[in-house]
Image (spheres, rainbow, N blue to C red):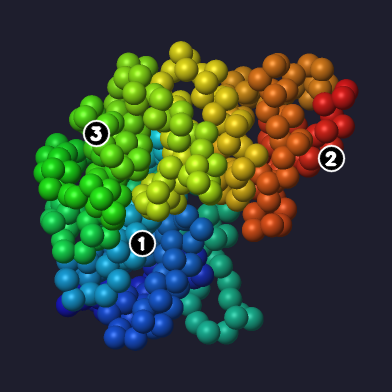
Amino acid sequence: MLDGLDDIEWRRLGHAYGAADDVPDLIRALRSPDPATRDDALGTLYTTVYHQGSRYQASAYAVPFLLELLADPATPDRPALLALVTSLAIGPDEAVLPDGFPIGAYRRTAEGGRELLAAKPAPWTGVDETAKEYVEYAYVESLDAAERDRLWAYIDVAVYDAALAGVPLLRDLLDDSDPWVRVGSAYALAWFPEEAAGSLPALARATQTAPVTGAGAVEVATLLIASGLLGAAPDHRSLAAPHPVVRCGAAIGRARVRGPETDPEAVEELLAWAAAPPTGADDPTDGGWVPFLGGDLSGYAGLALRQLGPRHADRAFDALTGRLPTVSGDQSLTVLGEALRMAFPDGPLPSGTPGAGLTPRQRRLAEVLSRSPEPWLIDGQEFGNVAMLVEEYGLPDDRTALTAYLTT
């Protein structure tokens, strides 16, 4: 187990905090019999080789060993390791939903990145914080914007390809005895479109054998969404499934493949979910947690409405603005981001545009925001990301100023 881990010159590979010479011990700690040790190691890997969604040179070297751990049923916490591997492969999934992972675009952007990476100095190593010099960061800062894009895309593609090598394992894990390993492997397979020809039959077989109650319903919904992201529309009959999570998964998958030709039943399912508040008796999730978009299926349904085309745009906007007053935090960013995209199809307002110059859709969204405190908050505190998002479109970045702006 983990043969070759110490053969890699980790100190010459960088992660978020300099040299990656701590990575081997962190990977070994994932096998520790002590849960606290495993949790600490996993958390540290999330802050080093996957820092706030960014991947680094060391990340690609860590992935094969994580896959080796996943392949061993005796490894503890395999669902958590699956989540880490998937995050390393694609970054935050909200950045690529509802369309799936654009690996072709990444590969094109990465052209020329290998040479830029080869010229990067080795990272700082040592324990003396006062002497730390981020020489590799200085190198990155010396590049122009296009070169930085090529460099980071090359690193991202290298990590992605390291995870891509694990696709056969992920297919095997669809038959694992642990239901959350099965869910995690279905979720992971969704992001490798280049392997769709082999993954779709495996997903279809798993869909036929999974139960449709309890955790099984979550599993089926994940399988259906994954199939849609890989280009196969779920069976129309899934739209009549007894569990709402399965119906939503089928609707999302069908919208991804059929687009404007999506059947009316799927459209209605998406609209109902997109408008649903996040808690209470009207919450359609029925206790099911599907891993896409951090479990926010209503938010994902709102994104999927985009794929229906202009025919349902007014109803989609109604659903988004209807849900917006009830959400906060990351859910607010999802709903608000999509509503802003619909209200401002030409981009931000020209400087100096008065409130009277807003289009009806823009004004309606601004009024909802001005009346609703919840979307501006995260855990009861002001959420700066929401304020920045609103400001990007040329609107005032707080409720008081927005209310005053609407009178101009």
Q: Quadrant of residue 185?
A: bottom left
- The 10 Å Cα crowd at callout 3, few under 14, some 14 to 19, many 20 or more, is some
Of labels 3 and 2, the one closer to you: 3
Spatial CA distance of label 3 from label 2 is 46 Å
Residue 130 position in % (x across, y down): 64, 81
69 vs 233: above or below: below
From the image, tell me which residue sits under label 1: 84
Residue 70 got which mark?
none
Give the amino acid type for the residue marked by disc 1 in the picture: Leu
Of labels 1 and 3, the one closer to you: 3
Query: Residue at (40%, 49%) from the top-left corner?
Result: 286
Task: Work out whether residue 360 or residue 395 is closer to the camera in this orientation and state it.
Answer: 360
Residue 226 position in % (x across, y down): 27, 41
Spatial CA distance of label 1 from label 3 is 30 Å
284 vs 1: above or below: above
What secondary structure is found at the residue carrying circle 1? Answer: helix
Task: Work out whether residue 1 or residue 260 is closer to the camera in this orientation and state it.
Answer: 260
Give the amino acid type for the residue marked by disc 3 in the picture: Ser
- The 10 Å Cα crowd at callout 1, few under 14, some 14 to 19, many 20 or more, is many
Spatial CA distance of label 1 from label 2 is 41 Å
Q: Quadrant of residue 262?
A: top left
Q: Quadrant of the C terminus?
A: top right
User: Are the residues flagged by discs 3 and 2 in contact, CB closer than 8 Å?
Assistant: no
Q: Is residue 27 left or right of residue 56?
A: left
Task: Work out whether residue 337 or residue 366 is closer to the camera in this orientation and state it.
Answer: 366
From the image, tell me which residue sits under label 3: 238
- The 10 Å Cα crowd at callout 2, few under 14, some 14 to 19, many 20 or more, is few
Task: Work out whether residue 81 or residue 180 is closer to the camera in this orientation and state it.
Answer: 180
User: Are the residues flagged by discs 1 and 2 in contact, CB closer than 8 Å?
Assistant: no
52 vs 104: above or below: below
From the image, tell me which residue sits under label 2: 400
Label tally: 3
